[in-house]
Amino acid sequence: PPSPAAPPQMRFPASPRGLLSYLVTLHVLRLGSGVFRVVGPGHPLRATVGQDVVLPCHLSPRVDARRLEIWWIRNRFSETVHHYQNGEDQDGEQSRDYRGRTELVRAGLSNGNLDLRILGLRPSDDGQYLCTVQGVASYSEAAVDLEVAGVWPGGFRGRSGCPWVCVTLDLSWILGCFPTPQSEGVGALPQL
């Protein structure tokens, strides 16, 4: 007989059916524990003003995200870009700059995809976004960097908020410049 101080021995089922039941139970317990992490693309995304863009993000392991609380937030401004909870979009807290312009790509939620589509990109959409997820026993977030470029006649492209300056002997022109959220007034130059 084992000594009273010895820890109890774990016994594995002897039959294949019992072993299969045991493994399935362990798997369900692991999935039910709610431990996950949010994974972003790991590189900046580039898009052009006027385009639609999908900001990719997913859970690891790839668990069903339909019942989780998902927030997409602008990191620099701490503004709500999109909020999803209990199977529905929560528009009440959404920044008016994004109202009617975002949608969570629902087709992939059951597979752990948290992708956000932004419609009709604006220069002010340039910057870092945080995808955050809250579960019963877990919280995680990942950053997604979006670089928005403008298009001007002749095919020139430039990142938003970065003016191009052409200097001549008698006058200077600023090409392809548009205001950013920090600008003062209409037509003001962005701060560098």
Image (tube, rainbow, N blue to C red):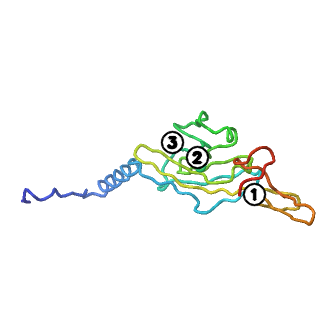
- Distance (Cα) linking label 3 and label 1: 31 Å
First in sequence, mark 3 or 1: give its number.
3
Amino acid type shown at disc 1: Ala
| Picture quarter with the C terminus | bottom right
Circle 1 — which element? Answer: strand
Q: Residue furthest bottom?
A: 169
Task: Please indicate whether residue 76 sits to the left or right of residue 162 in the image.
Answer: left
Amino acid type shown at disc 3: Glu
- The answer to which quarter of the image holds residue 1 is bottom left
- The answer to which quarter of the image holds residue 158 is bottom right
Task: Please indicate whether residue 142 sits to the left or right of residue 7 in the image.
Answer: right
First in sequence, mark 1 or 2: give its number.
2
Q: Which residue is mark 1?
A: 149
- The relative height of residue 95 versus residue 167 in the rendered view (above or below) is above
Circle 2 — which element? Answer: strand
Query: Looking at the image, do the residues carrying marks 2 and 3 touch, with CB atoms under 8 Å apart?
Result: no
Amino acid type shown at disc 2: Ile
Q: Which residue is mark 3?
A: 69
Q: Residues within 10 Å of mark 2 (few under 14, many from 20)?
A: many
Q: Which residue is mark 2?
A: 73
